[in-house]
Image (cartoon, grey):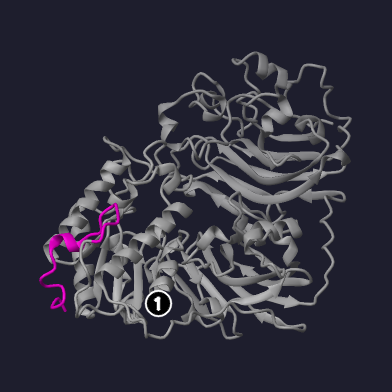
Amino acid sequence: MKKWIAGISAAALMLSAAGTAVAAPAEDAPVLDCSTLVTFGDSLTALSSWPQDAAKELNMYLVNAGIGGHTSANALARFDRDVASKDPDFVTIAFGTNDFVRVNGTDPQVSLEDFRTNMETIVDKVEALDAIPILFTAPYVRDDPPPYQGNYENGLTAALDEYNAVIREIAADKGVYLVDMREMCDSYDRSDFLVADGVHLSDVGKKAYTDTLVAFMREHFRTDPDAPRVEYPERPTVEPGTWTKDIISFDPADWMTPQTPDLIKVEQNEDGSLSFYNTNGLWPEMHYSPSIDKGVAVPLEGSVLNYDIVTEASAGIGLFFDGSTPTLAYDNNNISLAPALKKWDSSIRLSDVNDILPGQHLQGSIPLTELGIPESAIEEDGSVLFSGVKVFAVGTAYNRVIINELSVSTGVEIEEPDPPTDFETTVSLLPTEEQKDQVTQYQGVTDVTFEEDGSLRLARSEESDIAWPSVAIALNQTVDLSTNPYLHLKFVSDGGTANGMLYYTDESGEQKSAQFSQLVNGDVNDFPGDGDAYVDLAAKLESTGVITINQITLSVYGSAGQAVVWQELALVKEAEEPDPTDPDPSEPTDPSTSVTDPSASETDPSATATDPSATETTPSASETDPTKKPSNPATGESGAALAGAALLLAVACGAVSITRRKK
């Protein structure tokens, strides 16, 4: 394998930053024309045009084997699939930019020692294929502001350069070719060479990579002027007529995962549909990345995307255009499908990160003009090329995302779906048992029971060590505040005290939140005892526009086993008139009743809302006395016992307050 490398000086193994020619190709050096170049790397390879630009200029066949976020360890795990199976003649090896990252603040993802072993093994594997390995050093990264987490005593680039030093040592020790991209990029200003994230290549950086690799290859390998030109796949053109075509393959073999294969599965069901599911409870992804000639070209005007998707798990779906794919995302010509569908059909429920929530069957068509396809992906003739799809199966392991259809049709006119009715008389915001996948329990600290009467019982579990365990309920319910809706809260204490939060997007698109006790009583304290209140949302939120309630959280405070039963949490047209048998709000409340004047507890923190002897559901003194209760992050107080749970307790509430039915 190394017979034609022998005799080349060390200087001939590297292109200088100035681009000076250091040696002519050996007489027996391999010919570039019509050979296969595999570019093996991370996002600097996958998200860049330099591999295809260099291959075209060198008249080589290209296999871009870059995958964003990959380390040398990931690369070694997928070598056989992505390199060996492609029968390469030349393999560029470009890793390090992800290896050095200190994801937990102190330790890199791949240590220097392991990085050296991985890279040496990759070089050996390439040579075992009778192919030529070409090592790349990694370019600099922007040090300020740092794009990565972690503590880097001398800056990010200095930490990365330790890995570049290893790459140079491997090239020298093994006598293999090196293109020192790190040295080359010093000739450019970082703000020109990198995009705004301070890591990835700008157009200037991509061209510099292309020119550097082309010059290097021509200096070290021969060209054949008589060789035929490599023919690259042509971009499909729009077929005339009216038709429907799938934009994905329903053969699982045509899908790939950039992570370890056992993290996510894709299977074909008996009816021909595809099921995606993860095996780890996280969010691995599956790619459909066909070659450019396998994409589907369709006119933008008068065409629709047809979808039929069932979600047992949360789903994230990305569409890629104009030759861009999940694996090779040139120019970022892609969109997330879920927000476009939500804008088209507001009844679709999304998470706060725009995943399609579980327990839904999405079926219909949307005009391509409503998808938000990037202008850069629209051809001069008004056509669009669908060239790839990414699927995430998010959350609970083995819960499926089922795709029955994902296709495009031409010559179709459809009407916009009717907007969902805000509410007629009542729209419940509590999930039913059939919608239990809408409920997220934080670390299993809250027991959730769906009662036969439709109420929702939340109880502290025995193992809970968090003061205000809570659940989140995803909604995405549109509400027109100009119709003067009321929020009806009705709950019964079973030893626990209640509160919650309403998270919404206002008419300007700003994300906001409101605490239930603040809406009812104007303070942050919990509701000890039973509650039955009506809130004028337009008045309380100071808006008459259309908002979207994205999520409701409900918390329960008390000892293990104590609970709150939510009988109603709903949008209603009008507040129910107070029961005439209720005490006059202006009169002092009889302390023997379970409902008291909220002003008493708001003005006198030592006052107890109820007679502890009168009811078993009243919290203990330590639970109602704000001087003894653990502090609540939502009120701005501090508490060492809660510091580790600050994120989970963002919806938590304070101490004494009581509510009554209000108009």
Q: Amino acid type of disc 1?
A: Asn
**How packed is label 1: few (under 14 Cα within 10 Å), some, or many (20 or more)?**
many
Does the image show residue 181?
Answer: yes
Q: Position of residue 558 (x, y in %)?
A: 53, 35
In the shown orientation, is residue 652 left or right of residue 193? Answer: right
At 45% from the left and 52% from the top, the residue drawn is 204
At 32% from the left and 64% from the top, the residue drawn is 215
Count of numbered tags: 1
- Quadrant of res 59: bottom left
- SS class, disc 1: loop
At 48% from the left and 49% from the top, the residue drawn is 444
Indicate whether 163 appears above or below 592: below
In the shown orientation, is residue 320 left or right of residue 71? Answer: right
Indicate whether 638 appears above or below 400: above
In the shown orientation, is residue 196 left or right of residue 98? Answer: right
- Quadrant of res 532: top right
Quadrant (top left/top right/bottom left/bottom right) for the N terminus: bottom left
Q: Which residue is mark 1?
A: 59
Q: Nearer the viewer, residue 76 or 282?
A: 76
Q: Which residues are magenta?
A: 1-21
The answer to if 283 sits in the magenta stretch is: no
Q: Position of residue 173 (x, y in %)?
A: 11, 62
Q: Nearer the viewer, residue 595 or 409?
A: 409
- Dominant secondary structure, magenta: loop
